[in-house]
Each structure stands twice: as C-alpha cells, then as structure tokens.
Amino acid sequence: MKCPECVASGQMSKLYPQGSRSTLLGWSGPYYDEQGEYHSHDPNTVTSGYTCTNGHSFSQSRKRPCPSRGCEYGKTPEQIDEEKKPQCCGGGPQWGHAWSCRTLP
C-alpha cells in the first residue's frame, strides 16, 4: 500500500496505520450454501486511517470479503478477476497450488 498523494506527485514515503473502526450492523452470520461452500456476508464497513511521512492523511473503507472462492460479496474488481484466473499446474488447470505443483531443481 502507498500514499495516493505521494504516488500522484512522484514522492516516496513510509505509511503508518492510524487505527480502524467498524460499523456495528447486526446480521445473521455465516452460512454454508447448497454446494457446501462457506459464506460470510458481513454488512459492516471497516474504515482504516493512514498517515505518511510527508504529512498526508487518508482513509480507506471496505467490507470484509466473503472467503468463498467465486463469491463476489465485498470483493474488489481486482480480487474478482484474480479468482477467475486458473492457476496451471502440471499441464492442467488447478485452483490453488499443491506442493506437487512446485518446480524443484
């Protein structure tokens, strides 16, 4: 993560977290769908603040993403695109890398 103001102006900086807060909406909790996949659709928003060494401050708000692969709830477009990419292993598409997929010297 980088300070957006520093990136825009071509500056370098260190970034320091300044804490987070969350909304406190009630919800029914996680569940398993018809295929047995675990879902967690927490409607609460987490807002995190940051300060950089050049004196800029900013915050980011996000929902906690559902951990189920293929579920788009709370995920950024980049996260969704990344999940859709097959990861090749041994000539066949694999979703995830097993130890046997690693190239050994």
Image: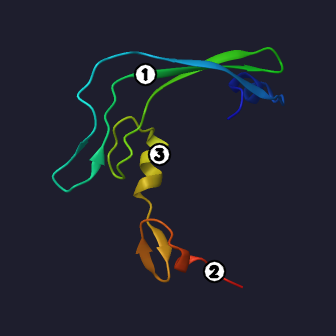
Q: Give the Cα distance between marks 3 and 2.
A: 26 Å
Give me the residue at 43% from left, 33% from top: 64
Residue under label 2, please give it: 103
Give residue 23's position: percent from left, percent from top: 41, 15
Q: Amino acid at mark 1?
A: Thr
Q: Give the Cα distance between marks 3 and 1.
A: 17 Å
Against 45, residue 100 (above or below) is: below
**Which comes before the other along the chain, label 1 or label 2?**
1
Is there a contact, CB below 8 Å, between mark 3 and mark 1?
Answer: no
Q: Quadrant of the C terminus?
A: bottom right
Give me the residue at 34% from left, 37% from top: 73
Is there a contact, CB below 8 Å, between mark 3 and mark 2?
Answer: no
Q: Amino acid at mark 2?
A: Thr
**Quadrant hosting residue 35:** bottom left
- Residue closer to the observer: 93 or 68: 68
Residue under label 3, please give it: 79
Residue under label 1, please give it: 45
Give me the residue at 34% from left, 29% from top: 42
**Quadrant hosting residue 28:** top left
Mark 3 or 1: the one toward you: 1
Give residue 53's position: percent from left, percent from top: 83, 21
